[in-house]
Amino acid sequence: MTGAPLVAPSLLSADFARLGEQIATVMDAGARWIHFDVMDGHFVPPLTLGPLVLQSIAPAVHEAGGFLDVHLMIERPERQIEAFAEAGADGVTVHAEATPNVHYALAAVRDAGCRAGLAVNPATPEGVVIGLADAVDHALVMTINPGWGGQPLLPFTLEKVRRLRAALPKLVIEVDGGVDARTAPGCVAAGATRLVAGSAIFGGEDPAAAYAEIAAAAIGGA
């Protein structure tokens, strides 16, 4: 599952009035991992998408051979895992900082039939992931402080990626935040195999071209 680096467009930055169209655009351009950010107004200030929206887009994503990667930036994520799994999630990522029952939450994700991801914020050490390696299918290293798109990548977080890659050479490692064609090669060189990009893809007039540019840059950094 490590393999060549893949770019995962984040729907957080998409035009919600044209969500289906924008998903089709990036998938036609080659995207296969679609990143679905969920925010609750508590763990992070904004409020975003929920299971009903996921359910509405899941058939089209799956018919095109896509993987729906649900990122729960919410408090007590274990309470919502089943709802997102039933709505069509293929993978569910929970934050180490969001629950006192991290191992339980990861087990609940697998029990629901999804791949289990563990996210860590910039200030959280990679040892949290290493200690739970047997319960994790992929890790998500936040390269910005979560909650808002368009922030610049925090360079020190790539050192965490390097340490995590050295400790767990076969683990799928995602990075999320500040990823664009300029920063993608450094993320891949540090050991990331999934690059989540939102505003860099959907913030311009041509999401397909932006996706292709980042994907090419990521491959160049491999």
Image (spheres, rainbow, N blue to C red):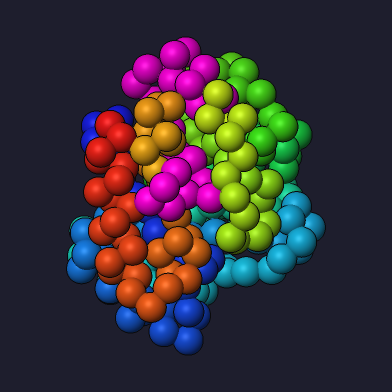
Quarter assignment of residue 87: bottom left
Q: Is 118 part of what is drawn in magenta? A: no
Q: Is residue 149 visible?
A: yes
Say which quadrant the N terminus sits in. top left
Q: Is residue 191 left or right of residue 78?
A: left
Question: Residue 49's x, y, as percent?
Answer: 57, 69
* 4 or 35: nearer the viewer: 4
* 118 or 3: nearer the viewer: 3
Query: Furthest-bottom residue in view?
Result: 17
Q: Is residue 132 visible?
A: no
Report the number of numbered marks. 0
Q: Is 177 part of what is drawn in magenta? A: yes
Q: Is residue 163 left or right of residue 189?
A: right
Give the residues drawn in magenta, as a range.
160-183
Query: Furthest-front residue in view?
Result: 182
Question: Residue 74's x, y, as percent?
Answer: 68, 53
Question: Residue 111's x, y, as percent?
Answer: 47, 40
Say which quadrant the C terminus sits in. top left
Residue shown at 52% from the left, 17% from the top: 163
Residue 186, compared with residue 74, is above or below; it is: above
Question: Residue 196's x, y, as percent?
Answer: 44, 50
Residue 63, compared with residue 164, is above or below; it is: below
Quarter assignment of residue 154: top right
Residue shown at 72% from the left, 42% from the top: 98
Residue 12, compared with residue 143, is above or below; it is: below
Residue shown at 51% from the left, 68% from the top: 13
Residue shown at 75% from the left, 52% from the top: 43
Q: Is residue 198 left or right of residue 212?
A: right
